[in-house]
Amino acid sequence: MPRLFSIKNALFLIPSLALGIFIWQPSVAQDNELCSFAARWQGGQISRYTCTARVSGAEVKAYLESQSGIQLVSPLRLYSISLIPNDTYYSEQTSYLNQIRSYEAWDKPMSDSLRPVIAVLDTGIDINHPDLSPNIWFNPWEVPGDRIDQDQNGFVDDQYGWDFINNVPGGTPKLEEGWIELAVQHGTIVAGVAGAVGNNAQGVAGVAWKARLMPVRVLDSKGVGDTVTVARGIDYAIRNRADIINLSFVGSLSDPVLEDAIKRAYNAGILVVAAAGNEAAVGVDMNLVPQYPVCDDGPNGENFVIGVAAVDAADRLAGFSNYGSKCIDISAPGTDIYSTQYVNAAEPKLTKPYGGYWSGTSVAAPLVSGSLALLKSAYPTYSASQLRDILIASGDQIDSLNQQIYRGKLGRRLNLRQAFELAQSSNFSAKSPVIVAPLTGQAAYVSTYDISGEQLSRFLAYDPRFLKGVNVAAGDVDGDGQVEIVTAPRQGGGPHIRVWNLQGQLESQFMALPENFRGGLSLAVGDITGDKKADIVLGIGPGGSNLVGVYNTEGYRLHQFVPYDEKYVGGVNVAVGDLDADGFNEVVVAPAGTSRLPVRIYERTGVMRREFYAWPYTFRGGVNIAMGDTDGDGMAEIALGAGTGGGPQVRLFNRDGKLLQQFFAYDSKFRGGVNVAVGDLEGDGASEIITTPGTSGGPHVRAFNARGEVRTQFFVGDTKFRGGLTVGAFH
């Protein structure tokens, strides 16, 4: 059968000038005339197909849908920028920044290391701009120019994002393809509104001074992209673990392929922020005439996209802004915005690094994206949905300031001060995330989830070629009031300890042993030295000396002891907790390998207090271990899980070695063992016992209370994976 389609480059729409306002808005007729389709394949690839002269769109669509391997087919849609230049000049940013109360939010304590990633899907960002370059996201795994995909993310040399218009590394603006000044500036303007460096004695201040800006070029230099470029850009942001995706553009027709990409971002715990779109004269009611992607919410009411309308300095709907209760979640200032601009010294029109004043929903959306990044930096344990709901609920009610026709269709107007007050009053911060990593057989990705199974973050802890598994623990190891995640390779990896913030940004690292050691390390986190900072407690894995060491974040060994006979080389698992509520943590150890050794409780000085057997003396498997206060009495309990070869039984003991509870976390016939962690997932002062299957088990996370009752359960990642998971939490 002859091919009925051909693959073409992106289609461009020529801008029109109307009433002194530049807008790019593909009409329904123009979209239909394209007769092009986007198709998503089972492997995740998104391709573009265009009709030939003698074949109708219906025939092409039917043919594509009949092909095995294609999951979804959608007519190709065009998307265009939503920014309007305005010749009214003001010399300060204070009008709109005061309007959203950003100054009061900037006074809140922030972590220097927690830097959420905003993926700016646009016409490109000037990565060399002095007010943006310190905040530009970069891929630390890539070596630029060597033509090798070091991190195996499918994009070679993508150190500073990706250009999906030309399919080349780097998300910077391009002039050689033809350009329009407004369009080529657009991405840099948007980036500056969201995340220009603040308090640096130059230029402008974005809302989130220390957010990282991921350049993803999905619109050309005339301001237009399509289904394929945008959907691919969203997948890139997902793959590279963005926290927020900003979409300051709009299209006029529904787009199943793009909606599917947005759903994937939502399921990955990413906040998607979209501009409402502009009209040349008066905005449209999107309850009647939906625009996309701003109206791309889920079929069952899931809030996939945070839709943003634009208001003026008096909180009235900007005349150009679209509106509608079905699509708009929040409003933000969108008139007379001053920001960073793309600079190219060879072009007379592109020599000013700052400019304005800009108006449009394009500049309202990044105010919301930057605000979400600021909130996430201050409250890293909040889930994406919690951050979204706080920002939406905390805004100022502006219905009374607007005409009756707009009431109920604008959301509340962004108010950062009130958002922080609401976040502070919420109890989310007391809740521990669930931290998981592969036990074996997958790249060393560490992921965090809330109690509902919503992903909070995901990051690569070690070289993507390392498949031997990662142990995880969590606690405030540097005394900054923020919880860190500590990782250690399992058997087969080196003694490379790494400390990360909850968003997956590396804070410190050290080698705990000689670099050639490959026995693996178990780890726990807790204050052993009494300095109010959690220490890193390491147990040597199989093949090494029978040793437990206590380290600080710089890798200095503070203390060590040998918990078992020196002849034992099967490895040691460790846990830390306060068993007697005296304010000092104990260290509890258990054999990691085949043995008949007991569980032992040690004072922080290394003096043994007590020992007991976790299972009958005949059991020779290893013992997995965790500690935490599971009943809210102020004293930690000891949770034990059988190692590989044992069943998925969990046992809970008190400080005297008395058995308090026991239960099977999974099918009693399973013999891969069970890994355990203890953390307060519900924020009620009583920690849950969190379990994951051991070797050969699926990615099934479960959490139980002290009575062995299930509190939550969910699957993570690829449900077909059978390499087992390690698990951690904080309490």
Image: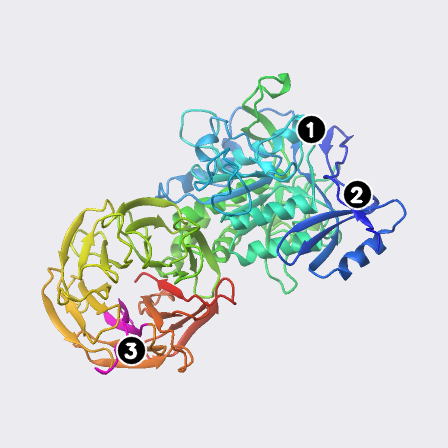
The amino acid sitting under disc 1 is Glu
**Secondary structure state at the residue bearing disc 3:** strand
Residue wearing tag 1: 177
In the depicted structure, whether residue 498 falls above or below residue 204: below
**Secondary structure state at the residue bearing disc 1:** loop
The CA span between labels 3 and 2 is 64 Å
Rendered location of residue 267, percent (x, y): 55, 59
- Residue mark closest to the camera, 2 vs 1: 1
Between 11 and 103, the one nearer to me in the picture: 11
Inspect the magenta stretch and tell me whether residue 635 lies in it.
yes
Between 499 and 253, the one nearer to me in the picture: 499
- The quarter of the picture where residue 41 lies is bottom right
The CA span between labels 1 and 3 is 66 Å
In the depicted structure, whether residue 222 falls above or below residue 515: above
- The quarter of the picture where residue 87 lies is top right
The amino acid sitting under disc 2 is Ser
Inspect the magenta stretch and tell me whether residue 361 lies in it.
no
Left or right: 539 as drawn, with respect to 171: left
Rendered location of residue 504, percent (x, y): 40, 49
**Secondary structure state at the residue bearing disc 2:** loop
- The quarter of the picture where residue 685 lies is bottom left
**Which callout, 3 or 2, points at the residue further toward the start of the chain?**
2
The amino acid sitting under disc 3 is Arg
Between 619 and 345, the one nearer to me in the picture: 619
Residue found at x 41% / y 46% = 377
Residue found at x 69% / y 45% = 322
Q: Residues within 10 Å of mark 3 (few under 14, many from 20)?
A: some
Residue wearing tag 3: 651
Highlighted magenta segment, given as a residue range:
616-643
Rendered location of residue 638, percent (x, y): 24, 72
